[in-house]
Image: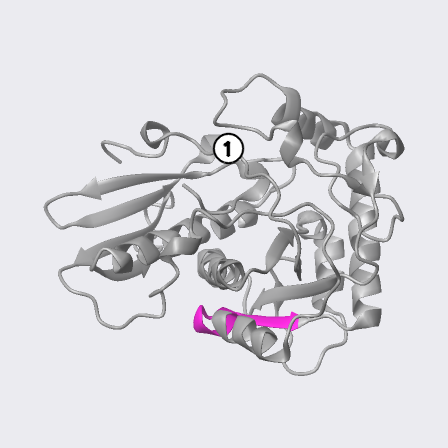
Amino acid sequence: MAAPSLRTTQPWRFRLDTDSRTVHIHAAADRARRHTDQVGRASHLSEGCAVLNLRVVAVHFGREPVTRPLPCPDRPALLATVRLAESVRDAPETGLYETVWRRHSSRSPLSGRPLPSDLLTELIEAAHLGGATMRFSGRHDTERELCATWEVEWRNRADTDRSAQSRRLVSGPHSPSLGLPSAALGPQDALDPLPIRNLGAHRHPEVLPARAFEPRPLLALPSAAHDRRTDWPRAGQALDRVLLLATRRAVRASLLHQAMEWPDLRRALDGLPVDGPRGHTQMVLRLGYGPRGPASPRRPVEETTADHE
């Protein structure tokens, strides 16, 4: 339940088969954001994050998580199964349990203090362990990525359906376990180089609370070699591993997903000049040191479990 998800939709349900000690992870299609996630990529990415969280918890309690992603092609809502074997070997998830509930996005200004090079390498290796690659942007690439994100903010504000969906997320009728409280939205950047998402789709963002953000944000782009439905949950597991490791090392992260929501801008990020093989960008991460910021609400257990498929 603590895994990251697009607009805190938490688009998953879990069912435990007690006979086989297997957890079935299902997509909750009714929680999808059809305007901002038209092909379901972000939902599958989020569900992959939930699978990795489940694996981390299983290891912590002495179980071996035997994972089968997308096990049944004829049941598209079944995203993965995780069988809880009797004993656990030394696993890469060991030691991440304490970060699961501490991890959440920070929409606050960061210090701009650089991350040590060995930590950058660790984060890249964490993504690689999950079957993804991750690159850190140089100065010029960062400028292009921020420009693409700003372009999305303009487009989203002009799109009636997307704006209405965002407003419902913040101020629409929902239970305390859903949506985003105003305290979690964070300020806008007073100097404008960093496009913090206008989650409330305010028509005049210049009147929103603003603070000075770091002038040169550190951006990281996790990518997958392919961009099929089978690749998205795996990329989500890699993304979650990076976020949990960052949290363990007191690094804050915010997810700049805006450019991922428009195919032309996402393709533009895929085509940025980089060293090594290119992939399909799955997320833009902003990383750095700073305040944790408030957490977003989570659904209660009864809304995330199912008695049958």
Residue 103 horizontal/vertical position (percent): 50, 50
Question: What's drawn in magenta, residue-wise?
Answer: 127-135
Q: Residue furthest bottom?
A: 276
Tell me if 123 is positioned left or right of 233 in this view: right
Determine if the magenta segment contains residue 134: yes
The answer to whether residue 64 shows anywhere in this view is yes
- SS class, disc 1: loop
Label 1 Cα neighbours within 10 Å, binned few <14 / some 14-19 / many ≥20: some
| Residue drawn at point x = 62 percent, y = 43 percent | 293
In the image, 35 versus 113, the foreground residue is 113
Instruction: Measuring from the top left, give residue 144's x and y in whole percent.
Output: 83, 63
The residue depicted at 89 percent of the width and 34 percent of the height is 206
The spot of residue 181 in percent (x, y) is: 61, 28
- Asked which quadrant contains residue 52, the reply is bottom left
Q: Residue furthest left?
A: 19
Where, by quadrant of the figure, is residue 70 drawn? Answer: bottom left
In the rendered image, which residue does mark 1 sit on? 297
Q: Camera-side residue: 7 or 98? A: 98
Query: Considering the image in quadrants, where does the C terminus appear?
Result: top left
Quadrant showing the N terminus: top left
Rendered residue at 84%/33% (across/down): 205
User: Colour scheme of this structure image?
Assistant: one colour
Residue 73 lies within the magenta run: no
Q: Amino acid at mark 1?
A: Pro
- Spot occupied by residue 157 in the image (x, y as percentages of width and height): 80, 34
Placement of 58 over or under 178, stated as above or below: below
Q: Does 182 appear above or below 99?
A: above
